[in-house]
Amino acid sequence: MSYVIDFPGIVTLPVAESSKSFPVGRIYCVGRNYAEHAREMGHDPDREPPFFFMKPADAIVQNNATIPYPQMTRDVHHEIEMIVAIGKGGADIPVEKALDHVFGYGVGLDMTRRDLQGEAKKMGRPWEMGKAFDNSAPCTAIKTVAMVGHPAKGAIWLKVNGEVKQKGDLSELIWNVPETISYLSKLITLRPGDIIMSGTPAGVGPIKPGDKLEGHVEGVGDLTVTYAK
């Protein structure tokens, strides 16, 4: 295949203990999926239907990268998440069959330009530019289901410069992974290569140039990213 313009090609994530890569198609993020995070964002954590926003695949940053502080913002926030890699597509997937569609899991960061997001909300405008910007989705390699099973509980945390800022447990998800997959598949047809960022626990907050972020999901992996000074 030849193209009429230069094109960077397919975005991929490494697959742990493999020479093969996972091709990333679309990134769906679940909003306010931990009760304490919903509260800190000023919302009622009652079990409302989940909502989703997207990031472009090329927002992905590989583990252990150093990246520039984003432009047009003074308030970038960290949001640590377990990511779910879809290996088999489908629509209207029943909850009890949802995990059959998972290829594996990883650790990701939903980096957010909170000031841009907040201003867009006040004006009643879409807030993609608060979420879907360059380098806004650092991710680890994907570990297959055969390696890690289907994590439903276990610690999830984030440190900034060695200090714990976010801490929670996967069991605290308002909508768990199979429920999330099922609901999303009623809105769109899931495709192999889709990534779901499953939500972040409480403690989100700002980072600055020079900060080192270390994220962890028990049994899944560790993510490190540094912001250039």
Image (tube, helix red, strand yellow):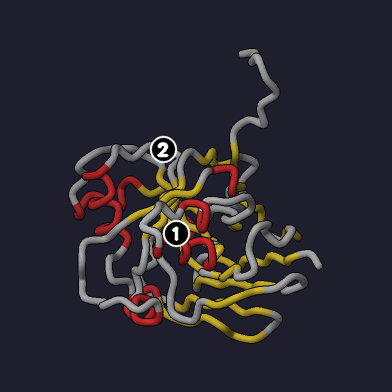
Q: Mark 1 packing: few (<14 Cα in 10 Å), some, or many (20+)?
A: some
Residue 179 visible? The answer is yes
Q: Sort mark 2 into few (<14), some (14-19) or many (20+) by Cα contacts within 10 Å.
A: some
Front position in the image: 150 or 69:
69
Q: How many marks?
A: 2
Q: Earlier in the sequence, mark 1 or mark 2?
A: 1
Q: Position of residue 64 (x, y in %)?
A: 72, 61
Q: Is residue 78 left or right of residue 168?
A: right
Kindly identify the amino acid type of the residue bearing the numbered disc 2. Pro
Q: Position of residue 111 (x, y in %)?
A: 56, 63
Which mark is in front, 1 or 2?
1
Does residue 213 sit above or below 20 in this rendering? below
Horizontal relation, residue 50 to residue 17: left or right: left
Q: Residue at x 67, y 31 (%)?
A: 8
Q: Tell me if residue 131 comes above or below residue 160 in the rendering.
A: above
Which residue lies at the image location 65% right of the left edge and 58% below the top edge?
Answer: 72
- Distance from Cα at disc 1 to Cα at disc 2: 32 Å
Rendered position, 9 above or below 82: above
**Residue 198, picture quadrant:** bottom left
Rendering coords of residue 229 (x, y %): 81, 68
Q: Position of residue 172 (x, y in %)?
A: 33, 77
Task: Check disc 1 and give the amino acid type.
Answer: Ala
Name the residue at the right extreme: 229
In the picture, the disc for residue 192 is 2
Instruction: Determine whether the residue tagged by mark 2 lies in a helix, strand or loop.
Output: loop
What residue is pinned by disc 1? Answer: 120
- Looking at the image, residue 112 sits to the left or right of residue 68; the answer is left
Snapshot quadrant of residue 35: bottom left
7 up-or-down from 80: above or below: above
